[in-house]
Every structure is written in C-alpha cells, then in structure tokens.
Amino acid sequence: MRLAFKLLHTRYRVDDIDRSVRFYTDVLGLQEIRRSQSPRGSILVFLKAPESDETIELCSFPASGPVNVQPDLTHLAFQVDSLEEFGRHLAAKSIAYSDGPHMKPDGSGFAFIDAPEGYEIELIQRVPGAPRGTTP
C-alpha cells in the first residue's frame, strides 16, 4: 500500500474571490490555472507559482460566514530573487511589508506581507546556490 506521497494543493477560504485572485496574481505573480464550482456551491480557484508543482486553492463559500484569520495561524512562503526589489514592486502597488525584511550576513533574508483576509505571506530570499528547501 502506498501512503500519501505528494502534496497537491493547500486550500485557503476567502471572502472575496476576485479580490484575492487579483492579489495573488498581481502582487505575487501566481498564475490562475483552473476555476470551478463545487457541488455544494463553493467557488474554487487554483493558483500556481511559475516554478512550483503544488497549487493553492482559494475557496469562496459565503454560507460558512466571514473568514476570521487568527494571528500567526498559518502562512504561505514564496521564494523571491531580491527582497529589496520585491519591496519596490510592493511600494508601486501601495503595499508595504508587514514585518521585515530581516536580512542575514550571508545575504539571505525573509519578510512578510498580508493577503486580503489577513493570511500571512512569507517572502524568502535565499543565498544563490543554497539547497532547495532551506530557509534563511
């Protein structure tokens, strides 16, 4: 028997699907790869980072009430080439880091921004040549 062997997607419920899709595509550069409606009426949008296999599923299900994200509940982490350059990209969209950037002497670092419902998004700058899966 084969146990769970591959992560396929992670779901985040959102209040305003269009606003959230715009955030993930315009701010983070993710690609919308599929949109559908579930049998119970949820609107589902799957997004993917250009160099990732896993997807993020955004789900809008108004019947369950408004989304209330608790502080430090969960976050998504994305690699960026440069936190400084990404910060300029954010500023052009009137967005600021909510925490950081925090840089290390080796040139790696991390920072956070908040998605529309309050989910934290971690942005990681790795040292060139660092093994995949390492964090600063």
Image (cartoon, helix red, strand yellow):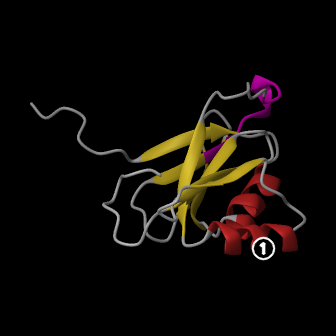
User: Which residue sits at x=74%, y=29%?
Assistant: 69
User: Which residue sits at x=73%, y=24%?
Assistant: 70
Camera-side residue of 41 and 31: 31
The secondary element bearing badge 1 is classed as: helix
Q: Quadrant of residue 81?
A: bottom right
* Residue 14 pos. (x, y %): 74, 40
Viewport quadrant of the N terminus: top left
Q: Is residue 136 above or below residue 89?
A: above
Q: Which residue is under mark 1? A: 88
The residue positioned farthest toward the right in the image shown: 94
* Residue 34 pos. (x, y %): 56, 61
User: Which residue sits at x=66%, y=29%?
Assistant: 72
Q: Is residue 84 above or below residue 64?
A: below
User: Which residue sits at x=81%, y=25%?
Assistant: 65
Q: Which residues are magenta?
A: 58-67
* Residue 135 pos. (x, y %): 44, 50
Q: How many marks?
A: 1
| Amino acid found under the numbered disc labelled 1 | Arg
Do we see residue 58 in this rendering?
yes
Camera-side residue of 112 and 106: 106
* Residue 17 pos. (x, y %): 76, 50
Camera-side residue of 94 and 16: 94
Q: Quadrant of residue 19?
A: bottom right
The residue positioned farthest toward the front in the image shown: 105
Do we see residue 48 in this rendering?
no
Decide: few, some or many residues near mark 1? Use Cα within 10 Å; few <14, some 14-19, many ≥20.
few
Q: Quadrant of residue 11?
A: top right
Q: Is residue 130 above or below residue 136?
A: below
15 relative to 3 in the view: left or right: right
Can residue 123 be found in the magenta stretch? no
